[in-house]
Amino acid sequence: MLVASTAACNSSSKRTFDDDNGGDAGGTLTSEGGVDTLRECAEDTKDVFVISAENSLYQFHPPTLEFKSLGTLNCPTNGATPTSMAVDRTGIAWVRHSDGSIWKVSTVDRACQPTNFAPPLHSFTKFGMGFASETAGSSNEALFLSDSEGGGLGKLDLSTLAVRSIGNYTGDLLGKPAELTGTGEGKLYGFFATSPAQVAEISKGTGEIVSAKVLTEVNAGDAWAFSFYGGDFYIYTNAINGAGPPLGGGGSDVTRYRPSDGSVQVVKSKVGFKIVGAGVSTCAPTSLPK
C-alpha cells in the first residue's frame, strides 16, 4: 500500500477562487531577479497547478475539486508547447516544452523566464518531473526527472541545470515512462502509463520501485499528468480520439486514488481542457485537511 502523511508549511496570503485573476497573457521577465514569486509556502503554493495543451495555466483546489483559470502563458517558445510541469515552494512553475526547453513561469502573473537547460544527447531528452523534499519536513527540495525513453530516474541540478542519472526503475516497471510527484515528507511517486496504469513509490536514491498499486480503472489516453495532495493522488487523463475509458470529448478526467482505503474514483469528468502537466509544491498538505 502507498501511504503519505503529516503537515504543510505556514500560510500567507491566499488567491481566492472568487478573484478574477484570468485574462490576458502574462509577459516575459528578463531581469536578474527572475519571475515574481510568492513567499515560501504561502497559502497559494499549497494548491495544485495544471497546464493545458491550449497553453493555459489553472489552479486546482482538491478539497473542492475546483479549477480556476489563471490565464494564458505567453512564453516566446516559437511554437513549442507544454508537455510537463513541476512547481517549487515559491510558486514558480518549471514548464518543459516540446522543443526540450524549460521555462520558469510565475503562478502569480504568468510571467516567463527562459532557462539555459539543454537536454542531454542520449537520455532525458523527454521527461516527466516533480519536486520532492530532500528529507521529511525539510525546506530543501530537489527536482526529479523520469526519462520518457526508458532511462529511469534522474535529478536536475537547480544551479547548473545539468541532469544526473540516478538509476533504472525495477520489476515490471523497468524501462517504463512516468510522470512524477513528490511530498514534503521526502517521498517520490510516479504515475506509470502502463496497461493497466500503476502508481508507485520510487526510491530517490536508486530509482528502485518501493511499492506499486495497479489501477485497473485508469486509462492514460493520449495525455496524462499526476499530482499529490492531502494523502491522495490525482491523475489527469485524456482519451485517445474518444476511444475507451475515459470517454472522449470535453477535456481531461480527474481520478483520485486514495491509499488510505484503496479507492479509485473519477471525481471530476470532462474539465473542458486537455491537461498535459501538473505540479504541486512540497508545501502541500500530506494528510487530509481537517
Image (tube, rainbow, N blue to C red):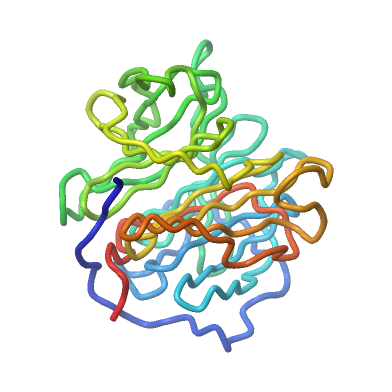
- Taking the spot 31% from the left edge, 59% from the top edge, the residue there is 260
- Does residue 34 appear in this view? no
**In the rendered image, which quarter contains the N terminus?**
top left
- Taking the spot 21% from the left edge, 67% from the top edge, the residue there is 7
- Considering depth in this image, is 82 or 146 the residue closer to the camera? 146
Q: Position of residue 73 (x, y in %)?
A: 67, 57
Q: Position of residue 55 (x, y in %)?
A: 71, 54
- Taking the spot 43% from the left edge, 21% from the top edge, the residue there is 172
Q: Is residue 42 left or right of residue 97?
A: left
Q: Is residue 270 left or right of residue 214?
A: right
Using the rendered view, name the quadrant where residue 77 is placed.
top right
Q: Is 247 located above or below residue 70 in the figure?
A: above
Q: Position of residue 91 (x, y in %)?
A: 42, 62
Q: Is residue 142 left or right of residue 73?
A: left
**In the rendered image, which quarter contains the C terminus?**
bottom left
Residue reaching furthest to the top: 122
- Taking the spot 43% from the left edge, 51% from the top edge, the residue there is 32
Q: Position of residue 112 (x, y in %)?
A: 57, 53
- Does residue 2 appear in this view? yes
Q: Is residue 128 left or right of residue 68?
A: left
Total marks shown come to: 0
Residue reaching furthest to the bottom: 18
- Considering depth in this image, is 284 or 112 the residue closer to the camera? 284
